[in-house]
Image: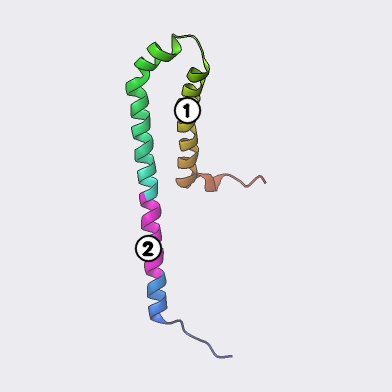
């Protein structure tokens, strides 16, 4: 059986693609976290207005939609960051 050695140009191209993919994944993680920090900062800045304009008023459909949107989005982003951050790989597959 003859052994074949891989072409060095192919190995170099694959190494470059792997390096580029790793760089893009890392950038995606950092940018996602930065966006989450800006979102939380915005929530902190506008919380006093939210209490005055939303919490102290009677509940309505618009109020419920606002609260749903305001507090569900950060939860979804936290789950996404948990998954992208690599922490989820330590959770056993229960399916």
Q: In which quarter of the image is residue 53?
A: top left
Callout count: 2
Residue found farthest to the right:
95
Question: Does the magenta-highlighted stretch encompass residue 18?
Answer: yes
Q: Which residue is drawn at 53% across and 48% down?
A: 89
Q: Nearer the viewer, residue 52 or 87?
A: 52
Q: Within 10 Å of the Cα at label 2, are there few (<14), some (14-19), or many (20+) other Cα atoms?
A: few
Magenta stretch secondary structure, dominant: helix
The range drawn in magenta is 15-27
Residue 76 vertical position relative to residue 10 in the rendered view, above or below: above
- Horizontal and vertical percent position of residue 21: 40, 60
Q: Which residue is drawn at 44% across and 9% down?
A: 56
Distance Cα–Cα, label 2 vs label 1: 37 Å
Mark number displayed over residue 69: 1
Q: Within 10 Å of the Cα at label 1, are there few (<14), some (14-19), or many (20+) other Cα atoms?
A: few
Name the residue tied to disc 2. Answer: 19
Q: Which residue is drawn at 46% across and 23% down?
A: 66
């Amino acid at each position: 059986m003859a052994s074949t050695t891989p072409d060095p140009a192919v190995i170099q191209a694959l190494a470059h693609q792997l390096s580029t993919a790793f760089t893009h994944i890392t950038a995606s993680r950092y940018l996602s976290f930065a966006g989450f920090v800006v979102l939380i900062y915005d929530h902190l800045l506008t919380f006093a207005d939210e209490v005055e304009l939303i919490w102290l008023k009677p509940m309505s459909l618009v109020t419920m939609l606002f609260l749903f949107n305001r507090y569900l989005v950060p939860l979804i982003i936290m789950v996404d960051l948990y998954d992208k951050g690599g922490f989820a790989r330590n959770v056993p597959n229960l399916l």
